[in-house]
Image (spheres, grey):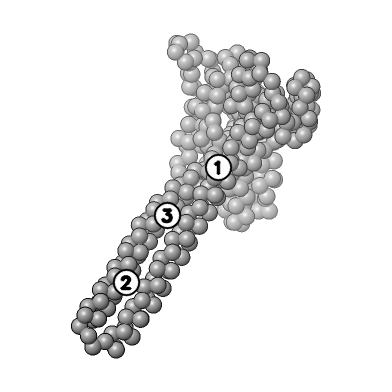
């Protein structure tokens, strides 16, 4: 897996895999003569890895129409598909917020100016009243006082309306900010947490000292073969299906994430090794006994299985040591023949 759809992107390919991607990006860079800068390289790297489905499809569409992929195009693809449009969304929210604050301040200043004018008008009327002994003059003064008071009332009503409009705008911006935050935490394909968010949760929990928790890493077996046989779209459906199994076992307290391409992770909170083993076993068995079919056909895609590695948090563990133990256990499950759960 190159990148788990997260912002900022995470690249976790091993040396060999990354070198292979490098080798495969060069012909594209050469063909379109785009400078090998970080932006262009990231776009081609993600394209050749095949892990960023939306980017791959956008580039394939251009290639099939024989459209050139210039530096401007890669910049656009980079912002849209590698950075997932996040800088633009954050920018928009920021300028929206600035606009609301500026407007509100302007309105308050305007009302303050009117209020000051009215107050000084009323003060003047008070002085005039003290020296007034003529009925006609009194009438004029009362009208003036009335006018000033009406002006005060209408500008405060206007301010109230403007503040209500600003409040609505702020609520919209708050929702957009929440959506941006959610996108930054979520894996686009499965709706589970993405790797970055999962790591932050794990870091947080590990630093609490006396937490009882276990970590499980799930890696779908022979996923490459499945993709090669039935295509990436079906591969994606399998990932989504597996994510629903994890969600069903989440029980509102456990945390599930897409950790890499076909690798998912779960933190079993308040669960020791035995309890986590039972939950992981149940997920493994349920997955292995699912009979998935090709869309619109009765043709089964055969048995798909998952290998699992579990580790339980020990005194002195960091997220890294915990992950390393789970990874070793997962490796053992693969080496022992796949479709099993091991712990370490
Ligand atoms: N459909 C689909 N495939 C993906 C995605 N991310 C990664 N993959 C594919 O997952 C496959 C993982 O292959 P390998 O790492 O060789 O592992 P495997 O074939 O599952 O073999 P074992 O793990 O040893 O059982 C690669 O072919 C990736 O292209 C994705 O989002 N969707």
67 over 141 or under it: above or below = above
Q: Is residue 192 left or right of residue 65?
A: left
Residue 148's tag is 2
Residue 150: x percent and y percent? 29, 68
Residue 118: x percent and y percent? 36, 73
Few, some or many C-alpha atoms within 10 Å of disc 3 (few <14, some 14-19, many ≥20)? some
Which one is closest to the eye, mark 3 or mark 1? Answer: 3
Residue 112's tag is none
Q: Residue furthest left?
A: 135
Which one is closest to the eye, mark 3 or mark 2? Answer: 2
The answer to whether residue 259 shows anywhere in this view is: no
Residue 166's tag is 3
Which one is closest to the eye, mark 2 or mark 1? Answer: 2
Between 293 and 104, which is closer to the camera in this rendering? 104
For the residues marked 3 and 1, what is the alpha-carbon distance in whole angstroms? 20 Å
Q: If you read the primary sequence from the N terminus, does the residue marked by circle 3 or circle 2 appear first?
A: 2
Between 3 and 228, which is closer to the camera in this rendering? 3
Residue 89's tag is 1
Q: If you read the primary sequence from the N terminus, does the residue marked by circle 2 or circle 1 appear first?
A: 1
For the residues marked 2 and 1, what is the alpha-carbon distance in whole angstroms? 45 Å
Q: Is residue 233 left or right of residue 175?
A: right
Q: Is residue 14 left or right of residue 194?
A: right
Local secondary structure at mark 2: helix
Between 260 and 23, which is closer to the camera in this rendering? 23
Between 326 and 59, which is closer to the camera in this rendering? 59
* Residue at 47%, 15% in the rendered image: 295
Few, some or many C-alpha atoms within 10 Å of disc 1 (few <14, some 14-19, many ≥20)? some
* Residue at 27%, 78% in the rendered image: 141
Contact? badges 3 and 2 (CB < 8 Å): no
């Amino acid at each position: 897996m190159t990148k788990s759809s997260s912002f900022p992107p995470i690249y976790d390919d091993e040396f060999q895999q990354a070198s292979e991607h490098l080798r495969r990006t060069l012909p594209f860079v050469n063909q379109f003569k785009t400078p090998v800068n970080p932006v262009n390289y990231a776009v081609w790297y993600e394209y050749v890895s095949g892990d960023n489905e939306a980017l791959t499809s956008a580039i394939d569409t251009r290639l099939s129409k024989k459209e050139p992929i210039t530096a401007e195009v890669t910049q656009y693809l980079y912002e849209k598909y590698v950075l997932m449009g996040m800088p633009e969304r954050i920018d928009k929210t920021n300028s929206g917020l600035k606009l609301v604050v500026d407007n509100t301040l302007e309105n308050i200043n305007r009302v303050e100016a009117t209020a000051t004018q009215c107050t000084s008008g009323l003060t003047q009327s008070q002085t005039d009243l003290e020296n007034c002994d003529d009925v006609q003059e009194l009438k004029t003064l009362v009208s003036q006082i009335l006018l000033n008071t009406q002006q005060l009332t209408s500008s405060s009503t206007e301010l109230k309306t403007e503040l209500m409009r600003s409040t609505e705008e702020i609520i919209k911006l708050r929702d957009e900010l929440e959506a941006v935050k959610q996108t930054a935490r979520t894996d686009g394909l499965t709706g589970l947490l993405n790797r970055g968010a999962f790591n932050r949760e794990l870091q947080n929990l590990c630093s609490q000292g006396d937490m009882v928790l276990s970590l499980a890493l799930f890696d779908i077996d022979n996923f490459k073969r499945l993709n090669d046989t039935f295509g990436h779209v079906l591969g994606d459906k399998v990932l989504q299906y597996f994510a629903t199994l994890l969600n069903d076992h989440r029980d509102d307290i456990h945390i599930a994430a897409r950790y890499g391409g076909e690798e998912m992770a779960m933190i079993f909170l308040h669960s020791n090794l035995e309890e986590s083993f039972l939950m992981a076993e149940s997920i493994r068995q349920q997955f292995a006994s699912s009979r998935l079919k090709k869309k619109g056909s009765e043709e089964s895609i055969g048995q798909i299985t998952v290998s699992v590695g579990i580790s339980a948090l020990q005194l002195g563990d960091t997220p890294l040591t915990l992950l390393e133990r789970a990874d070793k256990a997962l490796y053992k499950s693969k080496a022992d023949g796949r479709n099993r759960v091991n712990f370490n």
